[in-house]
Amino acid sequence: MGLKEYRAKRDFKKTIEPRRGGKGKQLFVVQKHYATHLHYDFRIEYKGVLLSWAVPKGPSRTAGVKRLAVQVEDHPLNYADFEGVIPKGNYGAGKVEIWDRGTYTASHLKAGLKKGHLAIELKGKKLKGTYDLIQLKGKPKMWLLIRRKS
Ligand code: MN
């Protein structure tokens, strides 16, 4: 964890994305990212960074629908406010827009990360309720994001 990998992938003289910074508020954000392949980036604040997953089809608002979520490098907290166009030739080039944002609660997050199962209650504008994030066995980066029946 940390921002090493995030920084290594980017040239901050060329991209307009934030390099660092941000204050903690238990926030979550979903960014719609028009990269080579359109996807949604689901991020939750944890220990001074944003844990991040790329969700090709985006989070479903229907309970029980499984959405693949590929864990990617941690992002700086300031990224939760980021919208704009990452210039051509840069990592993740394309438009980023905030699709939803809010706060979350989760108990036993640290243990959940270890175990590969997080239960996160989202309080956003579009996303509300509890979502399970379940890591696939033997595939550390691959998770499923599923809205729980309320
Ligand atoms: Mn992305």
Image: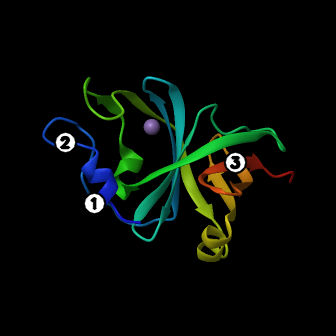
Numbered label attached to residue 90: none
Label 1: state its secondary structure: loop
* Above or below 114: residue 98: above
Whether label 3 lies within 8 Å of ligand 1 gets the answer no
Q: What amino acid is labelled 3 in the image? A: Leu
Label 3: state its secondary structure: strand
Crowding around mark 3 (Cα neighbors within 10 Å: few <14, some 14 to 19, many 20+) is many
Q: Closer to the N terminus: mark 3 or mark 1? A: 1
Task: Please give the name of the residue rendered at 68% of the width and 70% of the height, measured from the top-left corner.
Answer: 115
Cβ atoms under marks 3 and 1 closer than 8 Å: no
Q: CA distance from mark 3 to mark 1?
A: 27 Å
Query: Residue at label 1?
Result: 21
**In front: mark 3 or mark 1?**
3
Cβ atoms under marks 3 and 2 closer than 8 Å: no
Q: What amino acid is labelled 1 in the image? A: Gly
Query: Residue at label 2?
Result: 11
Residue most extreme to the front: 138
Label 2: state its secondary structure: loop
Q: How is the image coloured?
A: rainbow
Task: Please give the name of the residue rendered at 51% of the width and 64% of the height, measured from the top-left corner.
Answer: 26
Q: Quadrant of ligand 1?
A: top left
Crowding around mark 1 (Cα neighbors within 10 Å: few <14, some 14 to 19, many 20+) is few
Q: What amino acid is labelled 2 in the image? A: Asp
Numbered label attached to residue 145: 3
Task: Please give the name of the residue rendered at 44% of the width and 71% of the height, measured from the top-left corner.
Answer: 47
Q: CA distance from mark 3 to mark 2?
A: 31 Å
**In front: mark 2 or mark 1?**
2
Task: Please give the name of the residue rendered at 38% of the width and 46% of the height, measured from the top-left corner.
Answer: 81
* Above or below 143: residue 39: above
* x, y percent for residue 61: 74, 39
Query: Image quadrant for the C terminus?
Result: bottom right
Q: Quadrant of residue 83?
A: top left
